[in-house]
């Protein structure tokens, strides 16, 4: 089966600019996650979707970050305006509730804010 | 609060030596525990989970609820085991809470 796809793979922007990331999960996976991984740290959840509904966005900085999954498939994550501390790898993961609890990760988007 | 601690940033061993990657967690309740691995230039992937009690690529991990630990072990390290290893916990299979990760380097 095809894996989780993400684009772009790399992005360099200046602070105060906006940026958007795209994720296409594995076909049929109802749950989608966005994680932020800052250098030297483990991934940290930003938002969890179940189909097109938000399950958990408690750690999403809502003053600058937004995410949507309109048709319950693809998802976009946006940052506007970006800050230096947003430099990180943004990981998308999807999950199918078959009892294994396994999350399948995409390759990530590396964002550098200058 | 949910927290996962991996005390070692880097573990360097010789090929054929035993490996133990440490993981401690804090959680009120009964979490699911996982080890995820990221090989060079590959994506993060599941290595094993405590509920399955299986051995993957020679690795095993035992959940010790008394010590709140989930250490990853392998009796004989191989060069292809070199990677970044993350311990993670989840509640009801939802979001993962990750540790900071440990780099395992297996020297020949």
Image (cartoon, rainbow, N blue to C red):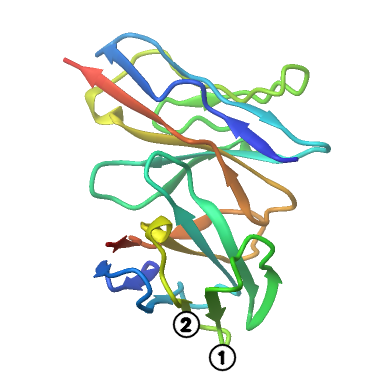
* Chain bearing mark 1: A
**Is residue A21 visible in this depiction of the protein?**
yes
* Chain bearing mark 2: A
Please give the name of the residue rendered at 61% of the width and 34% of the height, measured from the top-left corner. Answer: B4
Q: Secondary structure at mark 2?
A: loop
Q: In the rendered image, which quarter is residue A6 located in?
A: bottom left
Q: Secondary structure at mark 1?
A: loop
The location of residue B56, given as percent across then percent down, is 45, 33
Image check: B65 left or right of A16? right
Please give the name of the residue rendered at 68% of the width and 75% of the height, measured from the top-left corner. Answer: A54
Question: Where A49 falls versus B88 (above or below)?
Answer: below
Please give the name of the residue rendered at 50% of the width and 30% of the height, measured from the top-left corner. Answer: B55
Image check: A52 left or right of B18? right
Which quadrant does the C terminus of chain A fall into?
Answer: bottom left
Q: In the rendered image, which quarter is residue B66 located in?
A: top right
Total numbered labels placed on residues in the image: 2
Callout 1–callout 2 Cβ contact below 8 Å: yes
Image check: A48 left or right of A103? right
The Cα–Cα distance between marks 1 and 2, rounded to whole angstroms, is 7 Å
Which quadrant does the N terminus of chain A fall into?
Answer: bottom left
Q: Which residue is mark 2?
A: A74
Q: In the rendered image, which quarter is residue B5 located in?
A: top right
Q: Which residue is mark 1?
A: A71
């Amino acid at each position: 089966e095809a894996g989780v796809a993400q684009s772009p793979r790399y992005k360099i922007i200046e602070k105060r600019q906006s940026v958007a990331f795209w994720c296409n999960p594995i076909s049929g996976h109802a749950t989608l996650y966005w994680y932020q991984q800052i250098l030297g740290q483990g991934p940290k959840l930003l938002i969890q979707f179940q189909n097109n509904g938000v399950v958990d966005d408690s750690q999403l900085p809502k003053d600058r970050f937004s995410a949507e999954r309109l048709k319950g498939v693809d998802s976009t994550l946006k940052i506007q305006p970006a800050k230096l501390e947003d430099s990180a790898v943004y990981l998308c993961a999807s999950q199918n509730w078959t009892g294994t609890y396994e999350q399948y990760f995409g390759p990530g988007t590396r964002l550098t804010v200058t | 609060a949910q927290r996962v601690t991996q005390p070692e940033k880097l573990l360097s061993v010789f090929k054929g030596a035993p490996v133990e990657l440490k993981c401690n967690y804090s959680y009120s309740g009964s979490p699911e525990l996982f080890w995820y691995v990221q090989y060079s230039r590959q994506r993060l992937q599941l290595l094993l989970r405590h509920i399955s009690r299986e051995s993957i690529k020679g690795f095993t991990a035992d959940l010790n609820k008394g010590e709140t630990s989930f250490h990853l072990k392998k009796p004989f390290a191989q060069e292809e085991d070199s990677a970044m290893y993350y311990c993670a916990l989840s509640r009801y299979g939802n979001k993962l809470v990750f540790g900071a990760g440990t780099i395992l380097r297996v020297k020949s």
